[in-house]
Image: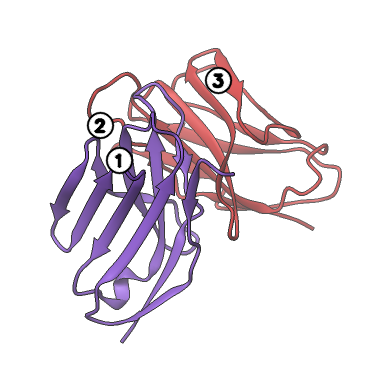
Amino acid sequence: DGGITQSPKYLFRKEGQNVTLSCEQNLNHDAMYWYRQDPGQGLRLIYYSQIVNDFQKGDIAEGYSVSREKKESFPLTVTSAQKNPTAFYLCASREQGALMNTEAFFGQGTRLTVV
Amino acid sequence: QKEVEQDPGPLSVPEGAIVSLNCTYSNSAFQYFMWYRQYSRKGPELLMYTYSSGNKEDGRFTAQVDKSSKYISLFIRDSQPSDSATYLCAMLTDSWGKFQFGAGTQVVVTP
């Protein structure tokens, strides 16, 4: 089955640590996205990538980093510079440039907690 | 001001009632409109998708788009407890653009 897989489902981070969230898709989509979701604030865009080896900052990129070395993979690193990282993180992908079927498909999320 | 406004709720309705959800937006360039359903601690899943004004129906769900008023709606008929979730609206200016999401409305359908 085609889809997006995020791992791990739950992640705990100590103060000062960097952690990496995994996102893999087998939908052959060019575009991939990382969102952060906090209660009452909806989805906020962290980073997005429209093609391999290229990515752009979203609205809240500070304290985060990404890479896009393969079409299928778009890992997100939450660095120690991110002061309030506890949140639900969602990865999405979609086919760009299509007149139809341009909706985003989401993974099941990773819940990150700072301990 | 946010580009997309959505009342976060919660919206509580009895089973069998019609659920009415809406979003307003400020960017007249939005052309593609989507509604996602998100259960607690899960990723959002697409419910409805439209790229034109008017109504679109799919089973118990109807999506309405009024571009002149910059207003979109989602109606759920004969609501069930399993419809209890957060509903997010999303919009795109074009197929190459970035999504703008509403804050999401929490819906609770009570038996």
In this rendering, the answer to whether A38 lies above or below B70 is below
- The chain letter corresponding to purple is B
Quarter containing the C terminus of chain A: bottom right
Say what amino acid the circle numbered 2 marks.
Answer: Asn
- Return the x and y of residue A105 as percentages of the image width and height: 37, 39
Which residue carries the number 2 mark? Answer: A101
Q: What kind of element bears circle 3?
A: loop
**Which chain does tag 3 point to?**
A
Q: Quadrant of residue B19?
A: bottom left
Residue projecting furthest to the right? A16
* Image location of residue B57, percent across then percent down: 14, 53
Find residue A49 and report its horizontal and vertical position in percent: 51, 22
Which residue in the structure is indicated by mark 3? A68
Task: Using the numbered discs, state the Cα–Cα distance from disc 1 to disc 3 in whole angstroms.
Answer: 39 Å
Circle 1 chain: B
The residue shown at (22%, 36%) is B52
Q: Is residue B39 above or below residue A41?
A: below
Amino acid identity at mark 1: Ser
How dense is the environment of label 2, judged by Cα within 10 Å: few (below 14), some, or many (20 and up)? few
Identify the chain drawn in red: A
Residue, far front: B68
Residue B68 is marked as 1
For image coordinates 33% across by 25% down, the residue present is A95
